[in-house]
Image (spheres, rainbow, N blue to C red):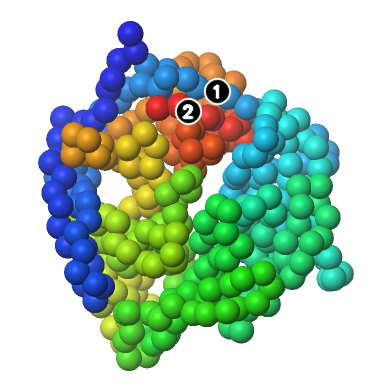
Amino acid sequence: MRKRHLMTAAIIAGMMTACETKQPAETCIHIDLTNVIDTDAKEIPLNEWAKNVRYVPLETNDNILIKYISVIYEKDGKFLVSHGNDRVSIFDKEGKYLHDISSKGEGPTNFISVDDVTLHNNLIYIHETRNRIKAYDWEGNFVKKLELPARANGLITIDGKEEMLAYVPNLAGDELLRFYRMNGEKVVDSIANPFVYPKAAFSQMFYPEFQPTTGHLKAFLELHSDTLYRVTDDWEIRPYLSIGIGKYQPTRDERYNVVLADIRKNPMNGKLPIIVTGEVSNRIYMHSKYVKKDETFCYDKHTQEAGKLLLTYPENTLDIPEDAAFKPKAILSDKYLVDWEQPDNDENPILVLVEP
């Protein structure tokens, strides 16, 4: 029988609590990681922890050389991979390269750059600039262009609905809007930002301030917030869970109260913000991209327990580096946790699909 390893020695009871302020009174899950985050993760072989592990080496040839992967989706046995050099490529279920989605260029059906990629209702949305999005089908044919009235990045979608939310970054603290609500090719509404500050002296940020979840849970976490917000089918923004990481949590006050004398100070020094990958089988998976160790945080909604894992690969697995460990970066088909590893042989990355 497969071993049901879940957590480290530090087991934390989850509580129900009110989440971040300035929202309608509502309770949500609270995940307290303050006593977990500095402990050593329990090292567990991945093949003992998981029900099933599948490795998919992406084909390497002169036409497809991948430096790094930024976004991945899966549909009907095909992988969509957004990667370095502003390319979006399609692979089959075995990792064979099929074709690209359009290409970088100045033409009306090309894209200038790839800032983000979102899959929605069988279309591939490429966020090419701060205020323009282009949509393509899976064969790479151009379908439509969406223009936003101002800077935005990151999309929230709900399956079966035409509408989408485009996130408006609050770089200087005084942004009045949080989302544009889009239908088809038009902006039809907006959602106000409940966290408005006097304009900050320092408005540059070198870390993504908007982190959407993947999989069936439609939610997002902002860099300087401890609260994950869920988007309902009626497009309401509701607190879903909060994460306690104590001194490692960057706050909005720290972000937007930087004065000119502190302009060279990195407001992220000493911080360790958590990224929520998503939810599978009533477990919420999290990690941090700001630490070297590939440690995974997991919260079980049934037992209300949280902890930290270090999921190691078997020896000599497809030239995956010996010190690498599985860290869930995305969820595919609402079933698989996904990571990707750069092998020692300089081939293209290997996708690792794990059924927990």
In the rendered view, would you say 219 is above or below 186? above
Question: Could you tell whether 234 is left or right of 91 in the image?
Answer: left
Residue wearing tag 2: 354
Closer to us: 5 or 134: 134
Q: What's the residue at 35%, 61% (across, down)?
A: 229
Pick out the residue farthest to the top.
Answer: 1
Q: Amino acid at mark 2?
A: Val
Question: Could you tell whether 344 is left or right of 42 in the image?
Answer: right
Quadrant for the N terminus, please.
top left
In the rendered view, would you say 116 is above or below 303? below
Q: Earlier in the sequence, mark 1 or mark 2?
A: 1
The x, y position of residue 286, in whole percent, is 35, 45
Q: What's the residue at 55%, 52% (across, down)?
A: 159
The x, y position of residue 140, in whole percent, is 81, 52
In the rendered view, would you say 275 is above or below 156? above
Mark 1 lies on a secondary structure that is strand
User: Alpha-carbon neighbours of circle 2 within 10 Å: few (<14), some, or many (≥20)?
Assistant: many
Question: Could you tell whether 177 is left or right of 21 in the image?
Answer: right
Q: What's the residue at 73%, 53% (across, down)?
A: 87
Residue 3 lies in quadrant: top left
Residue 102 lies in quadrant: bottom right
Residue wearing tag 1: 54
User: Alpha-carbon neighbours of circle 1 within 10 Å: few (<14), some, or many (≥20)?
Assistant: few
Residues under numbered marks 1 and 2 in contact, where contact means CB atoms less than 8 Å apart: yes
Query: How many dots with numbers?
Result: 2
Between the residue at mark 1 and the residue at mark 2, the CA separation in whole angstroms equals 6 Å
Q: Amino acid at mark 1?
A: Arg
Q: Please give the label number shown on residue 336.
A: none
Mark 2 lies on a secondary structure that is strand
The x, y position of residue 307, in whole percent, is 23, 37
The x, y position of residue 113, in whole percent, is 71, 65
